[in-house]
Amino acid sequence: MEINRKEILEILSKINPLGVLKNAVDNIPPCFTFFKDFIFVYNENFCILHPFKFGGIECSIPANEFYEVLKKIDEDEIDIEFKKDKFEIKSKTIKANLKVLEVDLSNKISTIVKDVKEIKKWKRLPNDFSEGISLCLLSTNKRLTNSYFNCIWVNDKNMISTDNYRIGRYTFDKGIGDSFFISENIASGLIKYDMKEYYKNDAWIFFRTKNKVIFCLRVLQYDDFPEVDHLFIFDGKNIKLPDNMKKIIEVSEVLATGDSEEEKEIEIKIENGEITCKGSNETGWIEKVDEIDSKINLNIIINPSFMKKIIDKIKIGKVGKNSILFKIENFEYLIGLMADK
């Protein structure tokens, strides 16, 4: 069967946004699965299906090897044939055979396809759904898995996350009428796509893009998410951050703790009319000290990328006895104050 190499490479890139195909998961090797009119990546908690007509073929092939072979071919038009236990790939100058994997996902995938086809009416997602996810990701716990601390809780009109020290709350203009959890690692991949619609059944939450790419998330069950709304209501004093706050942060983030931009942390301390931003990790530490027109004393840990992001929109925080609150349009970010050292 003749196919366009660039087209299938683009599809394969789209359906591996989370690094799902790096390692075996649940004893399933990294593979692309052709099933009826779709290409799948799959594990027990997450899968992606992309429309692709390939003659109704059903088989799984090594993901990384297939992708790399296609990248090495120069011609746009290639021929792919499925013959019993092998996948034949041909262009004018290159021929390759890939062994079909002995993994049977047909029953699991057919159930998902059946569920998708039974969806009578998809529900519309808010236009700012991905924006809410990207902001709430900043207050999830990246290491504490199998817990709502590692998730974003979508609850009708709100999207909430907390690591028990920080709380992010994003409010939609209109509720979606459902409640579900999205784990941090999956949420970080979802924000790369413009999700337009969703549907939830007892087993899965389905998200669909304008181009009909479908993301399937296994429904997560946790004990009741803690009530946090009352924590955003408190008496406090406003504190205005310096106009050069972004430059102060940029100095300290050079040695910020954290493996990724989302995980990085710096310490901000305000005391006796001075603000100190400090970044430290296993290689050393760096701090920047400047003046601040405030009599308030506080000490917080914060993500520098987030701080730089909000600083253009708001330079005033509300400081209470135990926390500081930043509010930007539909998003509120509450941070617990550290005890004095």
Image (cartoon, rainbow, N blue to C red):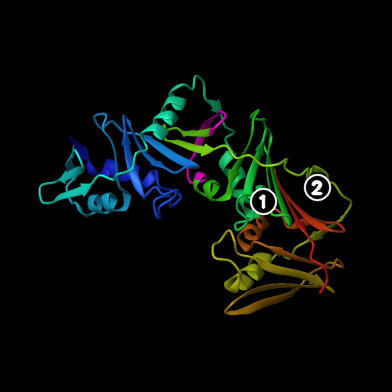
Front-lying residue, 48 or 333: 48
Within 10 angstroms of label 1, few (less than 14), some, or many (20 or more) residues? many
Q: Earlier in the sequence, mark 1 or mark 2?
A: 1
Callout 1 amino acid: Phe
67 left or right, relative to 312: left
Location of the N terminus (image quadrant): top left
At a point 25% along the width and 44% down the height, the residue shown is 100
Disc 2 target residue: 232
Nearest to the observer: residue 261 or residue 221? 221
| CB contact under 8 Å: marks 1 and 2 | no
Residue 36 point in image, percent of width and height = 31, 29
Q: Is residue 46 magenta?
A: no
- Region in magenta: 190-204
Q: CA distance from mark 1 to mark 2?
A: 18 Å
Q: Is residue 28 above or below residue 129?
A: below
- Element type at marker 2? helix
**Residue designated by label 1:** 149
